[in-house]
Amino acid sequence: MSTNNCIKNLLKFICLLQNNSINTCSLDDGCTKPFLGPSITNICYNTRIITLYKKNGEIFEASYIDENGIVNNSSLFRINRVKGDCVNLLILSSNGDNYISTGQYITIKISCICAVKCLADVVIENL
């Protein structure tokens, strides 16, 4: 099965934004803004949270083990890397409005993704 170039290009773009935003702050606005999130607060966001949908329309979830050794599922991800026909994702968990890195990653084939939903731009600590 061939890679979905539309999805792949979007994932690469988001990854590029994240990679360039970690240590970059600017008051520029618009499409060429080199960081994620609004410039009004002058906070340099480092993550654009995404959820993924499978070809059957179901939301994609990944399992992770929390700090108490309990297995949980999450549909919240940060793009870590796009390489070839695969995307490596950091699994995130949420606690209300706070998003937390689980420190665990999953790699999936881009051809398995039907849709990408972008959520809030946020700061994730301990990347």
Image (spheres, rainbow, N blue to C red):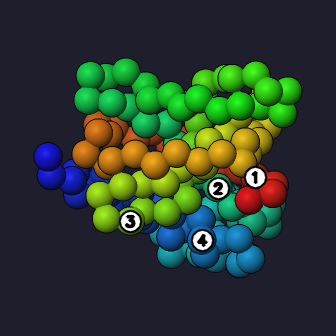
> Judging from the image, what secondary structure is the residue with disc 3 in?
strand
> Judging from the image, what secondary structure is the residue with disc 2 in?
strand
Report the Cα–Cα distance between label 4 and label 2: 9 Å
Asked whether the beta carbons under mark 4 and mark 1 sit within 8 Å of each other, the answer is no
Looking at the rendered image, the quarter that the C terminus falls into is: bottom right
Report the Cα–Cα distance between label 4 and label 3: 15 Å
Q: Earlier in the sequence, mark 4 or mark 2?
A: 4
Q: Quadrant of residue 70?
A: top right
User: Label 2 amino acid?
Assistant: Thr
> Judging from the image, what secondary structure is the residue with disc 4 in?
helix
Q: Which residue does the numbered mark 1 point to in the structure image?
A: 124
Answer whether residue 23 is visible to the viewer in this image. yes
Q: Earlier in the sequence, mark 2 or mark 3?
A: 2
Q: Which mark is residue 47?
A: 2
User: Label 1 amino acid?
Assistant: Ile
Quick check: 17 above or below 104? below
Horizontal side of 26 relative to 42 (left or right) equals left
Front residue of 9/113: it is 113
Asked whether the beta carbons under mark 3 and mark 1 sit within 8 Å of each other, the answer is no
Q: Earlier in the sequence, mark 4 or mark 3?
A: 4
Residue at the (53%, 31%) spot, across then down: 62
Report the Cα–Cα distance between label 3 and label 1: 22 Å
User: Label 4 amino acid?
Assistant: Asn
Horizontal side of 127 relative to 117 (left or right) equals right
User: Label 3 amino acid?
Assistant: Lys
Q: Which mark is residue 54?
A: none
